Amino acid sequence: MSISDNSSPALLPRHIAVIMDGNNRYGKIHQLGKGQGHIAGKDALDPIVEYCVSTGIEVLTVFAFSSENWQRPPSEVALLMHLLSLTINEQLPRMQKYRIRLRFIGDRSQLSEELQVLMLDAEAKTADFEAMTLVIAISYGGQWDIAHAAKQLAQRVEAGKLRAEVIDKEMLGGYVQLADAPAVDMLIRTGGEYRLSNFLLWQSAYAELFFTQTLWPDFKVAELAAMIAEFAQRQRRFGKTSEQVVIEQQSP
């Protein structure tokens, strides 16, 4: 499947972020066993990843487990951690087949040692792949991310390696997660909710937002393709006027 003929590689989002919401509701609607909605959600990721790499998307970041998800019932947290381990094991051959780099963002200190080792191993084995980067956010929160970056800068100031007055948004941006990746161009949330839920707050400052009623396990390539086609039609001004953007686009 290809995107609309009205789109061009220059108008493709470089970085797509997805809040994969609706797994529990999917399980309840389909009267599945406990946790089966999450399993269905895990399986829904594969065709989306394959489509993104075939389309030319540079980075796909998915929200697998948030900082706030630690507050869920212990049995559900244990299941999610188990599914994350399964996902990494299952994705590694796929990453190697499609030459996709696998990365993880979030506060790893709260994760089990076994899961941390698994993540490091997957990152090391795919570090040189350049077809696309798949980022999985685990134990991640946008506020934690910004605070963590500020803490690192504060430590440099305290050590006498940096003067506080030279800190600006560009410098702080160099310390957040994914500082070396393109900013998020397109942020998608499935499941019918209309909020960012503390996801990539810094990185998504100018992202185009897309919300759908579709529950994540039902989210298909066709819907993603339609969103990408719509993205290509939106005018991204970044604080400028429409007239300025048009003039810039017409300049050789």
Image (spheres, grey):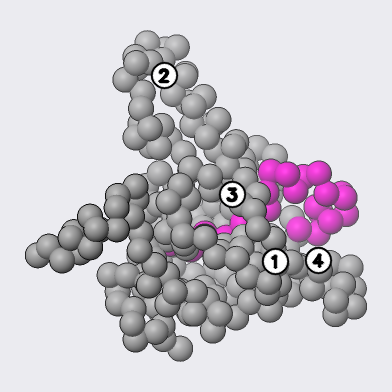
Q: Is residue 30 above or below residue 244?
A: below
Mark 2 and mark 1: span between their CA atoms? 42 Å
Q: Residue at x 31, y 20 (%)?
A: 166
Mark 4 and mark 2: span between their CA atoms? 43 Å
Badge nearest the viewer, 1 or 3: 1
- Asked if the residues shown at circle 2 and circle 1 are in contact, with their CB atoms under 8 angstroms apart, the answer is no
Q: Is residue 192 above or below residue 156?
A: below
Residue on which the image places disc 2: 156
Residue on which the image places disc 4: 24
Q: Position of residue 151 (x, y in %)?
A: 51, 24
Badge nearest the viewer, 2 or 1: 1
* Amino acid at the residue labelled 1: Gly
* Amino acid at the residue labelled 3: Phe
Residue on which the image places disc 1: 192
Observer-nearest of 27 and 198: 198
- Of labels 2 and 1, earlier in sequence is 2
Mark 1 and mark 3: span between their CA atoms? 16 Å
Badge nearest the viewer, 4 or 2: 4
Magenta highlight on residue 74: yes
The segment highlighted magenta reads: 58-80
Residue on which the image places disc 3: 199
